[in-house]
Amino acid sequence: MNLGIKGKIALVAAASQGLGRAVAQGLAREGVHLAICSRRQEAVDEVAQSIRAECGVEVLAMAADVTQEAQVQAFVEAALARFGRIDICVTNCGGPRGAIFSETTTADFEQAVKLSLLSTVYFAHHVVPRMAEQGWGRFITITSTSIKQPIEGLVLSNSVRPAVAGLVKSLANEYGPRGVLVNNVCPGFTATDRLIATSEIAARREGITAEEMRTRWGSTVPLRRVGQPNEFADMVVFLASERASYITGASINIDGGAVRHIW
């Protein structure tokens, strides 16, 4: 299938590892030029070098903390200076720490809002209006299946990430008439460093090993395993493409069927 995005320009946040890196690689393999960021310059430089060598696309690599609006704006402006436009934006960040409510403070919730919600708002403010001026754009947020079905031990994520889904629906309604499609992708258990860290916290609470916890999680999925980052990235790449031209305002699970609701 020709996805029709060769030569497009994409921003991918938090692209030095895990889901962000997989998405950046997936887009590059379709011939998309990239602006990628991470908090550590050396980490994002390594990804950029690897992608250039494999795919032959242009890659702008820049250090940016997505919880700081000034740094998000600087990243967006650097991409515009380099490429002249932004066609695709994939927002991403590390999720709030794992905890049950009794283990949290008000400050934890404030930080979770800044990390998961406001980081997305910053990108939306600085990217979506420019896409609307072009008459074409794809704005894709990465959240979690916790927006559909709360995950035990992740009260911060369960509380804040649904707000991102509400933002996505609102942006889709407002900017759809101007050619900008806005969607949300919801990873389930996926083999990333984040999953390992979360399993270690949950395992200590249960008195088992982290490996046993990950096996337990995988056993709850109809496919009886956790997902791989590239399986998640394939959906993001499709939503970024011309072939997804009638999909907007959606929150799509990539979770092996783990979420059991029917809507």
Image: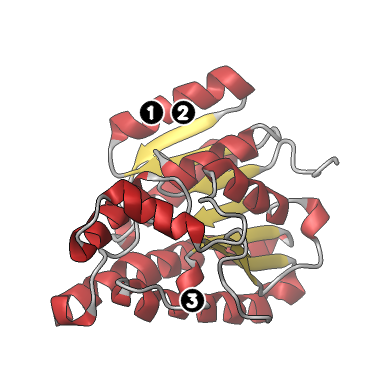
Front residue of 62 and 106: 106
What residue do we see at 67% from left, 63% from top? 133
Residue at the (50%, 66%) spot, across then down = 124
Say if residue 81 shows up in the picture: no
Residue of label 2: 48
User: How many marks overall?
Assistant: 3
Which amino acid is tagged 3?
Ile
- The disc, 3 or 1, on the residue closer to the chain's N-terminal end is 1
Kind of residue indicated by mark 2: Ala
Asked if disc 2 and disc 1 are in contact, CB closer than 8 Å, the reply is yes
Q: Indicate which label's residue lies in the foreground, 3 or 1.
A: 3
Q: Can residue 155 be seen in this view?
A: yes
Query: What kind of element bears circle 3?
Result: helix
Residue 73 in percent (x, y) is at 39, 56
Choose top left, top right, bottom left or bottom right for residue 183: bottom right
In terms of sequence position, does the residue under pointer 3 or pointer 2 come before the other? 2
**Front position in the image: 139 or 189:** 189
Which residue is found at the position 74% from the left and 51% from the top? 241
Mark 3 to mark 2 CA distance (whole Å): 31 Å
Quadrant holding the N terminus: top right
Q: Position of residue 218 (x, y in %)?
A: 48, 55
The image shows residue 191 at horizontal and vertical percentages of 45, 45
Amino acid type at mark 1: Asp
- Check the image and report above or below for 62 versus 179: above
Q: Name the residue under label 1.
A: 45
Report how far apart the C-alphas of labels 2 and 1 lie in the structure: 5 Å
- The answer to whether 102 appears left or right of 32 in the picture is left
Q: In this view, does 145 lie to the left or right of 170?
A: left
- Decide: is 117 above or below 1: below
The residue tagged 3 is 147
